[in-house]
Image: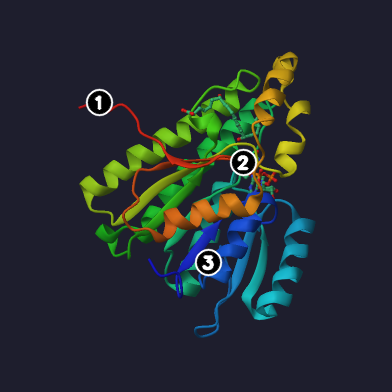
Amino acid sequence: MALSGQTAVVTGAARGIGRAVTELLLQHGATVTVTLHNAGHVVEVALLDVDESAGLSLKASLDQQHGAQRTLFLLCSVESEEQTKAAFQKTVETFGRVDILCNNAGVLNEAAWERSVSVNLVAVIRLTYMALEHMNKGTGGRGGVIVNIASMAGLGPLPSCPVYTATKHAVVGFTRAMAAASTALGYGIRFNAVCPTFVQTDLFSNIYDRMGMFSQLAAQTRKFATTGVLNVSEVAAGLLELVTDETKNGEALMLTGGGKKYMTFPTLS
Ligand SMILES: NC(=O)C1=CN([C@@H]2O[C@H](COP(=O)(O)OP(=O)(O)OC[C@H]3O[C@@H](n4cnc5c(N)ncnc54)[C@H](O)[C@@H]3O)[C@@H](O)[C@H]2O)C=CC1
Ligand SMILES: CC/C=C\C[C@H](O)C(=O)/C=C/C=C/C=C\C=C\[C@@H](O)C/C=C\CCC(=O)O
């Protein structure tokens, strides 16, 4: 799948993995946008995030690299149905299309576990269904690809963060089920998940304060972390593979310090 001329929606784009994904997609010619404003074929970028200062500083940096006309920051939360619906509507009004959705925004906080479920799972489902309205070939869309940023905690349990583990397992399951549904129903949309190990971001830096009643188990997680910590570009590269390789549908791509592995799962049939 050639990226040039494509329109991508990236959530949590202002920092961490989302920022790396945004920058890599832009470098490969996609129109990375949530809401934006398009003049002809000039690619413009709007970034969706709740962190206004990070979003504005990223915009300034992207302006330098790609020109001021290519970026727009939108202060918006994936937890808000109204804000995300408006973002998709503005994107389609302005560009007439959505080709790529990266559900990246995520949080880890076992003490505020309802928020983890809301951001990591409910919002992934909500934005997927919103994107379907615009991407589904069955309803006039062009098809495309949706990549969800899960985690290795979506493949195996982290006792220090059971709710985070649950949300990420759910994202992997939802992704694989949607891939099968899309094939059966002819959506023309591929669904894949990225499952990275630890990645050097703000989320990772704060995890030991976010384990709530499981904080006694932090030492075990620290031990896991000694197996290697990725940088954000490594995750973005994994996502790009899932976006551009049109043979990938229903995949869970595990990324560790030792490399990448396409996971296999027991088949029900
Ligand atoms: N850092 C790590 O070790 C790993 C992270 N992940 C996953 O990668 C994704 C990105 O995580 P990081 O870049 O590490 O986190 P981060 O905390 O560095 O960045 C997350 C971004 O999402 C934004 N965000 C948070 N809540 C939001 C909301 N309600 N609406 C819109 N934006 C929101 C934040 O403002 C921030 O810009 C998450 O889904 C996380 O679970 C997966 C594996 C490893
Ligand atoms: C505490 C969470 C820290 C960062 C968030 C990130 O999303 C994450 O959860 C990273 C997890 C890294 C885990 C690393 C090692 C082992 C985990 C075990 O639970 C086994 C997990 C997967 C095994 C998959 C397999 O090899 O079959």
In what element is the residue under mark 3?
A: helix
Single out the mark in the foreground, 2 or 1: 1
Which residue is label 3 attached to? 90
Numbered circle sitting on residue 237: none
Question: Which image quarter: residue 193?
Answer: top left
Q: Give the residue type at disc 3.
A: Lys
Residue 107: x and y in percent read 65, 37
Q: Earlier in the sequence, mark 1 or mark 3?
A: 3
Which residue is label 1 attached to? 268
Question: Which image quarter: residue 226?
Answer: top right
Q: Earlier in the sequence, mark 2 or mark 1?
A: 2
* Residue occupying the point 49% across, 58% down: 240
Instruction: Characterize the local packing of mark 3: few (<14), some (14-19) or many (20 or more) Cα atoms within 10 angstroms.
Output: some
Image: 145 above or below 95: above
Instruction: Name, please, the residue furthest toward the bottom.
Output: 40
Alpha carbon separation for disc pair 1 and 3: 40 Å
Q: Is mark 2 within 8 Å of ligand 1?
A: yes
* Residue occupying the point 45% across, 40% down: 261
Q: In the figure, is residue 66 to the left or right of 85?
A: right
Q: Give the residue type at disc 2.
A: Gly
